[in-house]
Amino acid sequence: MDVKALSFLGIKGKIGLIIILFVVFIGITAPVISPYDPTSLFEPFEPPSSTHLLGTDDVGHDVLTILIYGARVSILVGFATATISTFIGLLTALIAGCYEGLDPIISRILDFFLVIPRIPFIVIISAFLTPNIFIVILVLSFFGWAKTARVIKPLVKQVYSREYVKRLKCIGAGNWYIILRHILPATFPLAVAQFVLEGGHAILAEASIGFFGLEDPSTLSWGMEINHALQKSIIFLTNIWTWVLGPPILMLTITLLSTTFISIDLETRINPRLKVRSW
Amino acid sequence: MGVSRRFFVSKAAFYISLFILSITTVFLLVRMMPGSPLDYLGGEAEDVPYILTEEVREKLLSYYGLDKPLWEQYIVFVNNLLHLNFGYSIYFSEPVTRILLPHLMRTLILITLGFLFSISISFPLSIISAWRRGSTLDTIITLLSMSIYSIPSFALAILFLIVFSVELKLFPLIGFSAEENILDILWYALGPAMVFAVAESGRAYYFMRNSFISELDKDYILFAKSKGLKNKTIILRHLLRGSLSPIISKLALLFGYSLLSCMFVENVFNYPGITWLLLISYEYYDYPVLESILLIFMFTVIVMNAIADIISFIIDPRVRGGWM
Amino acid sequence: MSHVSDTSKEVILSIRDLKVKFYTEEGEVTVISDVNLDLFKGETVALIGESGSGKSILGHTIIRLLPKNANVSGHIIYKGIDLLKIDSSLLRNIRGREIAWIPQMVGSSLNPTVKIGVQIGEVLIDHYNYRNQRAWSSAIDLLKLFEVEPAEEVAKGYPHQLSGGMKQRVLIASAIAARPNLLIADEPTKGLDTIKKTLIVNIFKKIKDLKPDLSILLITHDLKFARELADRVIVMYCGKVIEINDKNSFFELPLHPYSKLLLKSLPSKGLYPIPGKPANVANPPSGCRFHPRCPYASDICEKSSPPLIKLDLNRCVACWLYKR
């Protein structure tokens, strides 16, 4: 296992990467490429036409515009949450793996985080603070880092107990020098896989919060759009659901599909046993 | 035997500390939530000031013990829990257990049905996939299950509703009406359970395939093959027995989590299970109900962890014989 | 192109032009090339070589247990059937019943979750439709024969309760339970001390008594062990067969310079190490693969690879010194 594992992705990973880059592109250029201002209102429930390519929703937002701005929210939440929780998780794993005395305490804390039900607690936290996306990012990171730490810790321990690390210690190398120069690079591929996985989880969790209608009402996210659509059961009586409900669900699904594909691809590269039959 | 006993004691201590930590966390978070259960007592929030005079309000607060300082409330709360007393619902004006049990039952029916469906699909598929690793069949099944795994379960539920209720009109669009007998209960649980099963089977398939694959790489499987044993023998005796313990442990954990992951399905189907009650009790600040539900969630996960430990203890002779 | 043949003895296995390649991420690696040899009925042949010489791979190739990224060409003829061309059901009937294999990894080749008796007797059930009872008593008989006592207790137990030497004997019992005609033993003395080695030697003698016409391919780097058991010796170096010789003649008058140096490196002969590093199959030297370490090397050795030269009925060597 080395950094080379990341230098090429398989076909699944490449497809995933193209999709996710496409979504990132949409998110970044949202103000430029979206046909209307996200706050402008039109006739509600207008079917797709040349003026509104994907029609309008229950309050008269242009669905395509909402979809494009929703990509922005999803990508931001996914990226920021994955960054924060991978950073904290990696740091925790390095500390727990290299300082044996701290390991039992850290393990217990990580175990406790596994028990906490994520969504209900976010529901309750939303009672304290109106969850705008920054709060959502913080809360999701708070719940996400422990998993990353759990996954990376065994690897850190394994690398730390290798002969060459012992030799480095013998010649008087400092613990943090060893950690930064030798152990951190070894965890890199796994950390990247975990980053992608956590990003996907965060995007799903954010959409779920939106789905329950718990986000700041002004947030233009796919989850909130689905929530608004589902409030009106009228959409099922006609074919309104095809343009109000379908597109955000589709966008969410392909985004999640891409992160799954990338992380699976990275996983099989890190652990080739899962792919090719070795014996 | 001494090693094994010490193992039990340290495990027990760990789980007890987890219980205490969960109870405290739930209590603090819920009691410190801004807002008060009394706001909704008289009906809609805007009516409350007319019904609740200051005097009545104080009486009610002291009746529910909410006027005491937080630490005293905590002692009462823990004491009640130890006596299996979950309190009295403020919103429903009934004992919490009376409210909770029917909802919990419905959720349990849903997830049990869903789990049975999900395992009966994913278990055989994962064995086939692992056995024929790298084949076209394996690739197709794996890609399919990854795709299903990526679709949020509420999206699957909505899709199901659109196909079966809107287009085919097989199920009622409104998920639930009063149930008369066990058949009604099962009928209402069937739709959500099927969606739940599909959503869970992707995850179940993937982890089972991975554990079978790492088992198939073991030296004793190679040796079993070298002996010319029938595939049936290799799979049933050598592959399954070795991987059963981690798989059952993981399934127990997944079952624990599914009390919660069925939240989306229950919500879309409007199925009055435990997560439906959770959202209601949250909306009306019904502390006792809210606390009880959160504790149920956390306790289930803890208990399932413990069960997973016990299962691997029973199944695996290596563990049973003490740590060598 | 030359190979050993002896009209007085019946050939049980003959390998022709065998070549094994592995596809790795770094590219193609040829681990075995141009192997030609015959095994006769009832003889014990020691396949000698240092680690990385391809001797274990040869064992895996015969019983077709190579990983999927291996590419095998040539012929392995067993009783007129080319083992490299048969389908999986015929292969299953040959494995264990005709050709058995004792793996190198003693510790991990027994299934930790299956009773010892079952692991020994299962071959008889699958190949000869033995009833469970009969297979069980056959297993106990074998354990008794191999002096794994108390046999009844051991049969009911699990591998983690056994010592390393007992595991090794159980492994051998499990492999030969169906009385195969050819036994491939991959480093059966690996990691054992002298006393246990003597025990294993006795076990192999007992197996021979049990079935005198059994042929054994003994893959080992342990010259003393080979001397005790073998009738003939085959030496491999860097994926090639470099010498085939009778046991006595090999130990008294080895042909290949490598064999000479190998014998000199024995403790009883003065413990002279062979100079230089073992050749690497991923990047083999030109010409004769031993030439960089060979004291007799000349120009031709560097340029071209020597063929296997047949000296007389039983002796072959691949060395330019013998080309007159």
Image: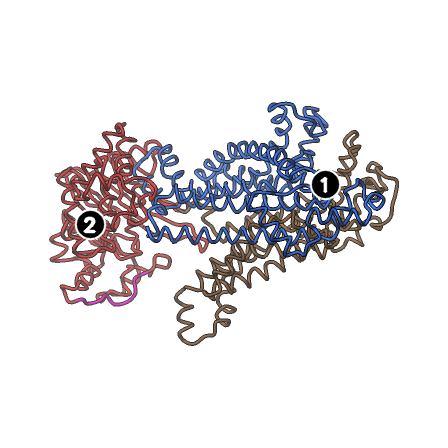
Task: Please name the predominant secondary structure of the magenta segment in the image.
Answer: loop
- Indicate the colour of chain A: brown
Q: Is residue A157 above or below residue B322?
A: below
For disc 1, the marked residue is B91
The nearer-to-camera label among 2 and 1 is: 1
The chain coloured blue is: B
Residue closer to the observer: C81 or C25: C25
Q: Is mark 2 in CB contact (under 8 Å) with mark 1?
A: no
In this view of the protein, can residue B9 be seen by the observer? yes
Q: Which chain is red in the picture? A: C
Residue at the spot 18% in from the left edge and 39% down from the top edge: C214
Q: CA distance from mark 2 to mark 1?
A: 85 Å
Query: Which quarter of the image is occupied by the C terminus of chain A?
Result: top left
Look at the image and say whether residue C83 sits in the magenta stretch.
no
Inspect the image, locate mark 2, and give the three-letter code of the amino acid beneath it. Ala
Depth check, front residue: B46 or B146: B46
Callout 1, which amino acid?
Tyr
Badge 2: residue crowd in 10 Å (few <14, some 14–19, many ≥20): many
Residue B18 lies left or right of residue B184; in this view the side is left
Q: Chain of mark 1?
A: B
Q: Check disc 1 and report its element: helix, strand or loop.
A: loop
Residue A156: image location, x then y, percent: 48, 61
Nearer to the camera, C244 or C185: C185
Residue range corresponding to the magenta coloring: C271-279
Q: Position of residue C30 (x, y in %)?
A: 36, 52
Rendered image: mark on residue C46:
2
Q: Position of residue A110 (x, y in %)?
A: 54, 56
Q: Is residue A238 above or below residue B283?
A: above
Pointer 2 chain: C
Q: Can residue C180 be seen by looking at this rendering?
A: no
